Image: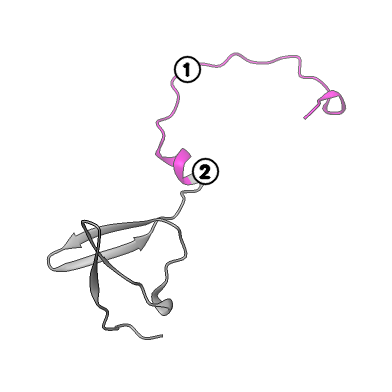
């Protein structure tokens, strides 16, 4: 896979745009773009997993009551 390709910039309304060649297509419908010096960095926006989201949350300080009388597993409707 090539790591570099010449592309042309064009105007799309008031925005500057470029067509991304097929070999550089991103596996996403959305992306993050940032500027580092003269470079533009475009990265696919990946959905965070539930575990990654939960890892960012603060632990709960609340005390939860003990549950003494749990129903038998066959009587639980999911």
Q: Main secondary structure of the magenta part?
A: loop
From what the image shows, is residue 75 above or below residue 55?
above
71 with respect to 2 (left or right)? right
Which label number is shown at residue 62?
Answer: 1
In the rendered image, residue 20, in percent from the top left (x then y), is placed at 35, 72
The residues colored magenta run 52-78
In the rendered image, residue 38, in percent from the top left (x then y), is placed at 13, 68
55 with respect to 41 (left or right)? right
Circle 2 sits in a helix, a strand or a loop, which is it? helix
Which label number is shown at residue 50?
Answer: 2
Q: Which residue lies furthest to the right in this view?
A: 74
Front residue of 27/9: it is: 9
Front residue of 63/26: it is: 26
Q: Is residue 12 magenta?
A: no
The quadrant in which the C terminus is found is top right
Circle 1 sits in a helix, a strand or a loop, which is it? loop
């Amino acid at each position: 896979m090539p790591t570099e390709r010449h592309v042309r910039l064009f105007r799309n309304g008031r925005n500057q745009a470029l067509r991304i060649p097929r070999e550089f297509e991103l596996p996403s419908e959305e992306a993050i773009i940032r500027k580092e010096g003269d470079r533009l960095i475009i990265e696919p926006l990946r959905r965070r997993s539930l575990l990654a989201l939960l890892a960012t949350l603060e632990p709960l300080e609340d005390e939860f009551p003990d549950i003494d009388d749990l129903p038998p597993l066959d009587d639980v409707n999911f």
